[in-house]
Image (spheres, grey):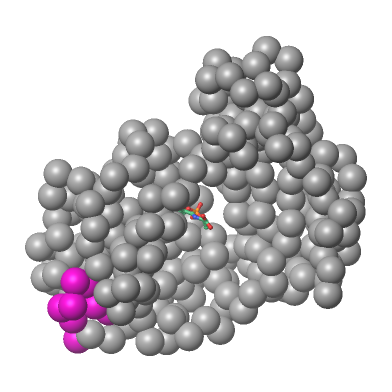
Amino acid sequence: MSRTVYVNGDYVAEEDAKVSVFDRGFLFADGVYEVTSVLGGKLIDFDGHAKRLERSLTELEMTSPVTMDELLEIHRQLVERNDVEEGMVYLQITRGAADRDFAYPKDATPTIVLFTQEKNLIESPAAKTGMKVISIEDQRWGRRDIKTVQLLYPSMGKMMAKAAGADDAWMVEDGFVTEGTSNNAYIVTKEGVLVTRHLGNEILHGITRAAVLRFAREAQMKVEERPFTVEEAKNAAEAFITSASTFVMPVVEFDGDAIGEGTPGPVAARLREIYLDESQKKAV
Ligand code: PDD
């Protein structure tokens, strides 16, 4: 069935949606994106995603073609028009179409595209079984805090994971884990300390990460925001990832070694439950 998507001010059938071949998103990956999950027909953590979008745009000297209020309305319209109960809204803003030139064009009009994807996010099989992860070298550019659409290395990482019989890859730089291909990475030490990399240019500042760390602290868990090594991950009691499309998802195997008991751990299960409860209460 054809979806209704949003392109530059219009709600159109997906087969009628068109963007120029000169669009800089297509030619230079000159664009940013957000993924917001939908549960019970409502948007999860919308404010956080809107704020990060503004930050990504500012870092690239781009401006949004719509206000954040308009953006919320477009998200809601798409959820309603496509009858989405559970899934995601994908949003992309590029610098727009201009004759090919490395320098930013002065007068291009930004392109804005949004579409929905239906998906069972809560009853995901991986939430019960846990994920297998491998380590790969982090070969991305140095501004991973900007949520750009240049996702080829993360795609290659997923393919490397698949080839190794795993579900995802954690990227490693100078011996320390940065993050997953499309998620933030965490371990729980044998002493019960929750460890995840500190914020900086090396990782995306996950919206789910911010909420989960807040809930962990509120639940009196000890949290350390610092880099951790591959060895620490292998010796951890538990590991998990967070993202808008997975919430909190346990990791049970790393580079072929079982983490802890090799089954989803209690901290990940508890944080997943708290996140799902609390974020749905605030959903818009
Ligand atoms: N990915 N790190 C990277 C590299 C990501 O691509 C993502 C999100 C995250 C988690 O951020 P958040 O909690 O705000 O979703 C961390 C999205 C879901 C994607 O590309 O589909």
Write the residue at 47% across / 49% down: 151
Count of labels in the image: 0
* Figure quadrant of the C terminus: bottom right
Magenta span contains residue 163: no
Which residue lies at the image location 36% right of the left edge and 73% below the top edge?
162
- Whether 64 is drawn above or below 117: the answer is above
Q: Is 37 located above or below residue 108 in the figure?
A: below
Residue 267 visible in rendering: no
Left or right of 56 in this view: 263: left
Q: Nearer the viewer, residue 245 or 48?
A: 245
Q: Is residue 210 above or below residue 37?
A: above
Q: How far across and down, in percent of the image, does residue 270 sit?
A: 40, 76
Residue 178 in sight? yes
Q: Which residues are magenta?
A: 252-261
From the viewer's perspective, tell me whether residue 109 is left or right of residue 241: right
Residues 16 and 86: in front is 16
Towards the viewer: 141 or 200: 141
Task: Determine the image quadrant of residue 244.
Answer: bottom right
* Near-viewer residue (2 or 76): 2
- Image position, residue 117 (x, y; %): 69, 66
283 horizontally vs 30: left or right: right
Residue at image coords 13%, 49%: 175
